[in-house]
Image (cartoon, grey):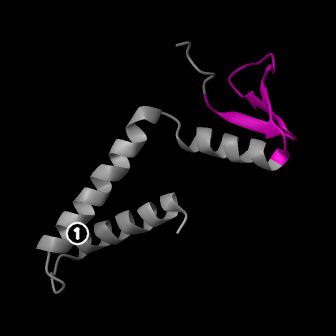
Amino acid sequence: MSKHTPELWYTTGGMIASEDDPSGKTIAHVGTPADAAHIVACVNACEGIKPAAVKDVLAALCGLLREYDQHIPDDCECPRVRQAADAARAALAKAKGE
């Protein structure tokens, strides 16, 4: 498999290009500017993350939160732990579009 074009990407209308390519070569022509913007946002947000790992990371986070819910009492006086769990839940909900 060939290596993909490095991030950061940008969009102009329905075209996608890379800031790393000084020639300004187009990576893709996409049907609509909204689709192009969505693709670019996903690619840039995942900079440095291996795509094959995303499902595993989400599954691990869900598992961690399940364990937290089962083993950490509601009256736990661990504010940093509770804040971390709340931040993890918010990130997970955002990732799922909830």
Q: How many marks?
A: 1
Residue 31 lies within the magenta run: yes
Q: Quadrant of residue 21?
A: top right
Q: Secondary structure at mark 1?
A: helix
Percent coordinates x, y for residue 69 in the rendering: 21, 73
Q: Is residue 7 above or below residue 61?
A: above
State the residue at coordinates (15%, 72%).
70
State the residue at coordinates (55%, 16%).
3
Residue 25 lies within the magenta run: yes
State the residue at coordinates (26%, 64%).
65
- Would residue 49 be found to the left or right of residue 22 on screen? left
Percent coordinates x, y for residue 17 in the rendering: 76, 28
- Would residue 70 be found to the left or right of residue 56 on screen? left
In this rendering, does residue 26 appear at all?
Answer: yes
State the residue at coordinates (38%, 67%).
89
Q: Which residue is mark 1?
A: 81
Extent of the magenta region: 7-33
Q: Is residue 74 above or below residue 72?
A: below
